[in-house]
Image (cartoon, grey):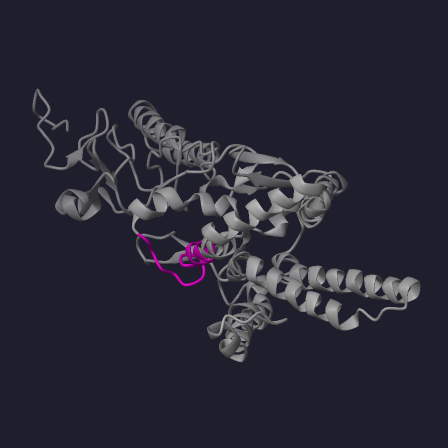
Amino acid sequence: AASRGLSQCIPCPHPLSSERGSATCSVCKAGYYLQGSADPAAIFEKPTDHCKPCPPRADCSVPGTTLEALGVPPGLWRASNLTTELHECIASDHCSGSVLAAEAERSRRLSASAFVLEYGSGSGDTLVSLGDTAAAEAHGEGCNVGHSGPRCEWCSKSESQYFDRAQRGCTDCPAASTRLGIFSGVLVAAAGTSILFYLALTRIARCGRVGARATHRLARIESHVGLQPKLKIIVSFYQIGATLGPVYGVRLHEDLTRWTNFMDSASLDVLDLAYPDSCIGRMRTRLLIGALWPLALILLGAAALACHTFAVRLFSSRDDFHANLGRLLYWAILVAYLVLPSISRSIFKAKQCVSYDINVFTGERRSYLVADLTVLCSADDEEYSGLDAYFWAFFVLWPILVPLAFLTLLLWIRSEVRAQRVTPLA
């Protein structure tokens, strides 16, 4: 700082610095930032109380950096200009950071000091006010245009857009008819393939000696390998691995999760397969669809079996009701068994929140619903409070009642299972 009556500047005490031509050490030096506001005398008297080391990955390379104008490099995001927590934008390429804001703040300080030295202090306040406005506009939320919210993963440009993690940015919601048409086509193709495969296996024995030999060989392979038990083990492993974290909050070691992440792509969440859930609407609508579509699928199977029973009775006068009732029970068990992990995960999306620090002085934090960043995890948010009834109803239905139903069924047929006797339920 320049000292009156001396021919040279004297060093400022650690960790302070000074503006060009200033007679006081009132700003923090490079590598530090000013936390809060105070008069120059208070800063000079207790510099370590006001000047704090620069947070990890932040930019404090120029003297005079303040908390509000903290430099945030591109690719990082912070929840407000009153926090030192910087978060990496893992899924978004639109975190612009706030380096420009920090540079604007420093330029403003230098310009204001030069103006005061040349014209006096009368107009300095005006320049400071204009500089603050420019810095605030440059800073924004640290996101590119059209992106906002936590880690710039909220599309603010239009309600017809959603954040696509594969594209790492906002994109237009696809036409519902197109996505549903593709999804329906995939379902029809899968169902047709399954039917053809079933018909081929049941009628291969009718193809003479070659068919009988092939049937016998396939039966031997199945008896030696045991495909059905191994398939059940694989499905059960998927169910456990897919629900431990999101549903039960269990954290597995990264050496295990490194090769089990493929299970996320095997999810049977119909919302993600058919249509982006962010494009459907409010969170309660997504919750309703995600929890009720398996029941609709079971009812669709019941309707198909009812039509089959009616057709058999009409054309052959044969009563196939009890056989189809057993098939319906098998279909309901199969659907519930396969979709239970995905449905449980979709239900718990109504309670999964992420919290960010927004005020380093008061310790205040703000939580967002991960599935819908427009919803705050707070009792004051009507949308979040309205999800409680849906969550508890579906929580009782799927993660509690469905496993209890499976347990009841196993206890009911335990004697047949022990005796290895085949019955309609075992």
Which residues are the magenta region? Answer: 236-252
Quarter in which the N terminus is drawn: top left
x and y percent of residue 11 in the render? 9, 29
Q: Work out whether 186 lies above or below 249.
A: above
Residue at 59%, 65% (x, y): give it: 382
x and y percent of residue 301 in the render? 73, 61
Quarter in which the C terminus is drawn: bottom right
- 18 and 313: which is toward the camera: 313
- Position of 200 compared to 111: left or right? right
x and y percent of residue 81 in the render? 38, 44
- 238 and 217: which is toward the camera: 217
Q: Work out whether 394 lies above or below 20.
A: below
- Position of 270 compared to 399: left or right? right
Asked whether residue 160 appears in the rendered view, the answer is no
Asked whether residue 202 appears in the rendered view, the answer is yes
x and y percent of residue 308 in the render? 82, 61
Quadrant hosting residue 33: top left
- Position of 425 compared to 78: left or right? right
Magenta region includes residue 340: no
Magenta region includes residue 245: yes
Residue at 31%, 22% (x, y): give it: 118
- 421 and 179: which is toward the camera: 421
Residue at 92%, 62% (x, y): give it: 315
